[in-house]
Structures are given as C-alpha cells and as structure tokens.
Amino acid sequence: MTGELTPEQSRRFWEGVAFAERFFMGLDEVHQAMRKLCMTLEADGIPYAIAGAMALNAHGYVRTTVDVDVLMTAAGLAAFKAKHLGLGWVERFPGSAGLRDVEFNVKIDVLIAGNYPGDGKPKSVCFPDPVVAVRGQDVMVLAVRDLVELKLASGMSSTDRLKDLADVQELIRHARLPLALADVLDPMVRGRYTEIWQGTTAAVDD
C-alpha cells in the first residue's frame, strides 16, 4: 500500500527543489543577502569573515542553507548597527547580535570574536578575530583550519550541534582534507578530528 503526500507536503517538496536549484546556481535569496552584506562591510572597512555553511561551500563541501553566518568583532557589529539598522537590516529582537535582511528576508547570524562555540561555555577554542579570514572573490571567508576547529568544538560541547560534526566529516570527504590538519588544530578537538578522519577515509576505502 502506498500513501500520498498531502497538498501542503507536495508544495513544500517542490518549493525545496526550486530553492535548491536557485541556491546551487547562486541565484537564491541567501546568496544575494550575503553579497549585499559583504559589499556593505567592505565599503565600511569593518573586518568580517563568512562562516557556517557558506564557508563550507567555499572550501569544497557544497550544501544549502537558509541563513548567513558572519564572524565580526563586537566593535564591528556595533559600528554596522549604528550605520545600517533600519536601512535594509533589523535586529531579530531588541539588542540581539542576530540580524535579518529585510530585502531578502534572510537571517544573519553574527558570531562575535571571543565568544565560545557550541554550549557557549569557556573553552580553549573561541571565535577568532575576523582578521584570520582568507580572501575570496568579493568575500572574506573563514580559513578551513578555523572552520573545522570551531565546528568540532561546537559539536563536541553541545548535543544540539551534532550537525557540526557531520559537516566536518563531509568536508573531509568532499575537500579531501588531510590527516595532517590535526597537527595545527587545538588539542581540545585534535583527537576528534583524527577519529572522524579515520572513520571517513576507511568508509571510502571500503
């Protein structure tokens, strides 16, 4: 016996297909919001680094996302808010670091340098100063070492962030990251990276 999707489920399915198609062509709302944000930050001279899924895409693991993660300093965020709130961006709630691009209706998750990933508790891995970013075409992106380190620390410290560990696994698989990357990672996450790398490459060999 086969079931059927409800009309609402069918609508969501085809909307998802359409969004993925636009996303992989770089024509979706998330890409447009990111480009607009990067252009504004660069014009203002505010240091930043794109993080999260959009950074994964830059480093070789391509997947969709519905928001933009950007690393900034507290001072940089304050300067951005002072100049641009109400002019294309709003706070998601009063005083929040999180923003929303009102033109494209896309969430902007701002990661503040010095804060801690995952459970937010002090640990040896924290969000770095955005000056560590690497230059791409019209964008500054978190370097792969920092991206992996942060995602591991996040997934290891919060059961609500296990997807971050899966992101590292997929980045190892798709970008063929070397085992030697473990040597430059923080000791807190070094063993987990090695474990994930060995499990991922063993599965490929099989």
Image (tube, grey):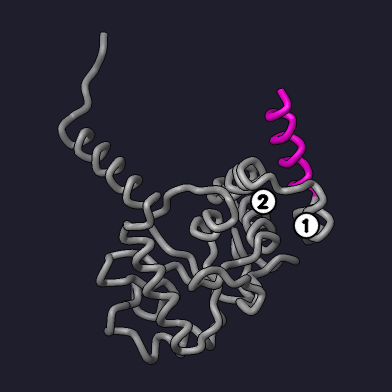
Count of all numbered marks drawn on residues in the image: 2
Question: Does residue 190 appear left or right of residue 4 in this picture?
Answer: right
- Compared with 67, 96 (above or below) is below
- Compared with 69, 73 (above or below) is below
Residue bearing the label numbered 2? 156
Q: What stretch is highlighted in magenta?
A: 191-206
* Residue lying at 60% horizontally and 65% vertically, measured from the top left: 120
Residue bearing the label numbered 1? 188
Question: Does residue 181 appear left or right of residue 148 in this picture?
Answer: right
Question: Does residue 61 appear left or right of residue 197 in this picture?
Answer: left
Residue type at tag 2: Met
Q: Where is residue 147 in the image (x, y as percent from the top left)?
A: 63, 60
Pick the front one: 84 or 143: 143
Q: Position of residue 157 (x, y in %)?
A: 65, 54
Residue 111: in sight, yes or no?
no
195 inside magenta stretch? yes
> In the orientation shown, which residue stands out farthest toward the left?
7
* Residue lying at 43% horizontally and 64% vertically, measured from the top left: 68
* C-beta proximity under 8 Å, tags 1 and 2: yes
> In the orientation shown, which residue stands out farthest toward the front?
137
Label 2 secondary element:
helix
180 inside magenta stretch? no
- Compared with 195, 158 (above or below) is below
